Amino acid sequence: FISYNAVTTAFSRYATHVWGMQNGGYANCLLVGTVAAIISYIPIGHLASKIGRKKSIMLGIVLLASCFFAASFMNTYHWIMNVFFAIIGFAWAAIGVNSYPMVVEMSKAGDVGKYTGLYYTFSMAAQVITPILSGALLEHVSYRTLFPYAVFFTIVAFCTMSMVKHGDNKPTAKKNLIENFDVDD
C-alpha cells in the first residue's frame, strides 16, 4: 500500500517536475494501470487458485518492484511507461485480490472481525502516512526519490510476505477418497 499509493498520489507532480509533462498527459499512465487492474481481477483469482494466494502476492510484489525500478531510470516520458503501468495494474490486482482473503483464511470464525479491523487499520494507515513521507522526500530531497521510495517499500513488503506461513487457499480434495486421508509429515 505504501509504495503503490506513493506512486499514484505523486505521479502527476513527478511527471510535471521530472519529465516536464503538461496538460494532464500523465493521466494516461494512471488510466492504463487502472484498466489493467480491472481486467486482471478475475484472471488473478483463477491464477491464485492454481498457484496459491501467497505466490500470487509475491509475484505482484516482484512485478511492482521491477516496474518501479525500471521507471526510476526514465528521464523523460516514453510510451513504455504505459506498459509499465499496465504491469503495475496487474501486479496491484494480484496483491489486492489475495491479501484480504488471506486474512480471512487465517482467522477463526470468532476472530474474523478483529483481523479484518487490523488489516484495514494498517492498510489505511499506510495510505495516510505515505503521501506525507513521500511528499516530504519529493519536496525536500528530489522528485526523483518517488520510484526508489516505491522500490524500497516493495522490497520491505516482499520480506514481510515471505515470512507469512498461513492464509493460503486450501487445496482441493483429491478425487480418490482414500487419498483424502493421506497426511503429510
Image: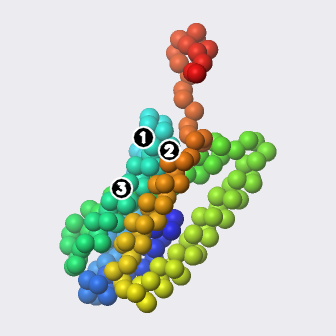
Which mark is drawn over residue 104? none
x, y percent for residue 166: 60, 41
Q: Is the residue 21 above or below the residue 48 in the image? A: below
Q: Which residue is mark 1?
A: 47
Q: Nearer the viewer, residue 155 or 33?
A: 155
x, y percent for residue 21: 27, 85
Left or right of 143 on screen, residue 123: right
Closer to the eye: label 2 or 1: 2
Q: Give the residue drawn at x 50%, y 43%.
A: 53
Q: Is the residue 10 above or below the residue 177 in the image? A: below
Earlier residue among tags 3 and 2: 2
Q: Nearer the viewer, residue 164 or 103?
A: 164
x, y percent for residue 82: 27, 66
The residue furthest bottom is 140
Badge 1 vs badge 3, beta-carbon distance below 8 Å: no
Earlier residue among tags 2 and 1: 1
Distance from disc 2 to disc 1, alpha carbons, whole Å, reads 11 Å
x, y percent for residue 24: 32, 83
Q: Nearer the viewer, residue 92 or 131?
A: 131
Closer to the eye: label 1 or 3: 3
Q: Amino acid at mark 1?
A: Leu
Question: Which SS class for mark 1?
Answer: helix
Left or right of 43 on screen, residue 96: right
The residue furthest top is 178
Question: Which SS class for mark 2?
Answer: helix
Q: Give the residue drawn at x 27%, y 65%.
A: 70
Q: Give the residue drawn at x 65%, y 46%.
A: 104
Q: Which residue is mark 3?
A: 63
Earlier residue among tags 1 and 3: 1
Q: Which residue is mark 2?
A: 54
For the question of whether residue 24 can be seen, the reply is: no
